[in-house]
Image (tube, helix red, strand yellow):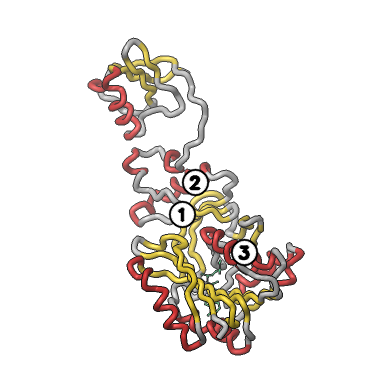
């Protein structure tokens, strides 16, 4: 293919290639040609090229095979220093892609949205994630590319969940936790999934059918409605009892269970102490907490002390699920209630 061509001595080749790439001036669809000790670089039509850089002309270049970029930021036609300001990470929930951006990039959010729409296969809509808020942890999102609403179906652990990223909490980063907790359910266990959201812990735990019962409780009626929609699609759905209720009310009448999970990670130990009396002797409490990194080592002792009034508890694992902020992690803490 014919294109503008910048010819430079071989020794200056790499330096010039990098400078052109940084300025967004290098054509990435055409191969650089080497001939007679010189490199010939394909340059974009609109790019400004100074005479001092080399000899500018025109010539045929072989096309590069179309390989997709491994980083969506490469789809932004920006100088690399500006691309580097864009966070590399994003979340995929069904056919929805969510990205968080610093304030400095908000003016360019639509370009970033279009790049993600092209980069992630089967994306329908891209949202600017403005974080979760309120007791129901609903996400505030703004459409920055694509079309349609925020309801989708998300696949994880060979299950498909009805999700609405705006109306009920869901995080695709917890798939490993949903599977791990489900794998620890023993035959005949009663399982409480408290603050269940759209129910990924409950549904995953119910799938293998060994639990005696699974109760999933959430105060957000829209989360419970989404859980019901998921359960209707599975033959084991009847094992899960979805309940629209506050945990504070549920604990007043609930009986004991061998597996009790509470997932309100910003409330610290408060809800763990509230639900600890429900854990049957020999049972296990799972709870999640956002903890400053320099306090993680001391956390097991703090948790055991806080639960002691409800019974003899021993922390069995404290693991980091993922970083939550530059200075804190989301922790998964398992605590066993001893028999006496
Ligand atoms: C972090 S989300 C947990 C989502 C879910 N466990 C998961 O893995 O996707 C917290 C959930 O707790 C619910 N919630 C908050 N306060 C509650 C309360 N007092 N009683 C019951 N549910 C509550 C919210 O509606 C929200 O769905």
Q: Secondary structure at mark 3?
A: helix
- 183 or 4: nearer the eye? 183
Which residue is outermost to the left? Answer: 52
Q: Residue at x 57, y 63 (%)?
A: 180
**Label disc, if present, on residue 183 of the rendered structure:** 3
Residue 22: x percent and y percent?
A: 32, 35
Q: Is residue 308 above or below residue 91?
A: below
Q: Residue at x 72, y 67 (%)?
A: 209
Are the two marked residues, 2 and 1, in contact with CB atoms closer than 8 angstroms?
yes
**Label disc, if present, on residue 182 of the rendered structure:** none
Q: Check disc 1 and report the residue beneath it.
A: 99
Tell me the mark number nearer the camera, choosing from 3 and 1: 3
Residue 247 visible in the picture: yes
**Mark 2 residue crowding within 10 angstroms, few (<14) / some (14–19) / many (20+):** many
Q: Residue at x 44, y 63 (%)?
A: 320
The residues tagged by marks 2 and 1 sit, at their Cα atoms, a distance apart of 9 Å
Q: Check disc 2 and report the residue beneath it.
A: 116
Residue 133: x percent and y percent?
A: 46, 70
Sequence-first disc among 3 and 1? 1
Sequence-first disc among 3 and 2? 2
Q: Is residue 107 above or below residue 309?
A: above
């Amino acid at each position: 293919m014919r294109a503008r061509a910048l010819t430079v001595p071989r020794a200056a080749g790499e330096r010039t290639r990098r400078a052109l790439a940084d300025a967004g001036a290098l054509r990435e669809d055409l191969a650089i040609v080497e001939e007679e000790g010189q490199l010939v670089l394909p340059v974009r039509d609109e790019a400004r090229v100074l005479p001092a850089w080399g000899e500018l002309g025109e010539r045929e270049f072989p096309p590069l095979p179309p390989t997709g970029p491994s980083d969506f930021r490469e789809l932004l036609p920006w100088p690399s220093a500006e691309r580097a300001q864009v966070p590399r990470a994003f979340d995929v929930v069904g056919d929805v892609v969510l990205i968080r951006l610093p304030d400095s990039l908000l003016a360019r959010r639509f370009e970033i949205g279009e790049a993600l729409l092209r980069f992630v296969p089967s994306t329908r809509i891209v949202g600017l994630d403005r974080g979760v808020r309120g007791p129901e942890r609903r996400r505030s999102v703004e459409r920055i590319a694509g079309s349609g609403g925020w309801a989708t179906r998300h696949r994880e652990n060979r299950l498909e969940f009805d999700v609405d990223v705006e109306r009920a909490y869901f995080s695709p980063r917890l798939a490993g936790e949903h599977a791990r907790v489900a794998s620890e359910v023993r035959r005949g266990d009663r399982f409480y999934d408290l603050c269940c959201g759209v129910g990924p812990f409950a549904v995953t735990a119910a799938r293998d059918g060994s639990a005696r019962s699974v109760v999933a409780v959430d105060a957000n009626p829209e989360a419970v409605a989404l859980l019901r929609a998921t359960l209707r699609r599975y033959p084991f759905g009847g094992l899960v009892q979805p309940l629209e209720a506050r945990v504070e009310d549920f604990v007043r009448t609930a009986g004991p269970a061998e597996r009790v999970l509470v997932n309100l990670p910003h409330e610290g130990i408060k809800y763990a102490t509230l639900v600890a009396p429900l854990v049957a002797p020999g049972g296990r409490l799972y709870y999640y907490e956002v903890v400053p990194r320099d306090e993680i080592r001391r956390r097991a002792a703090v948790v055991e002390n806080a639960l002691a009034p409800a019974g003899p508890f021993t922390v069995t694992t404290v693991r980091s699920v993922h970083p939550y902020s530059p200075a804190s992690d989301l922790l998964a803490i398992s605590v066993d209630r001893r028999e006496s």
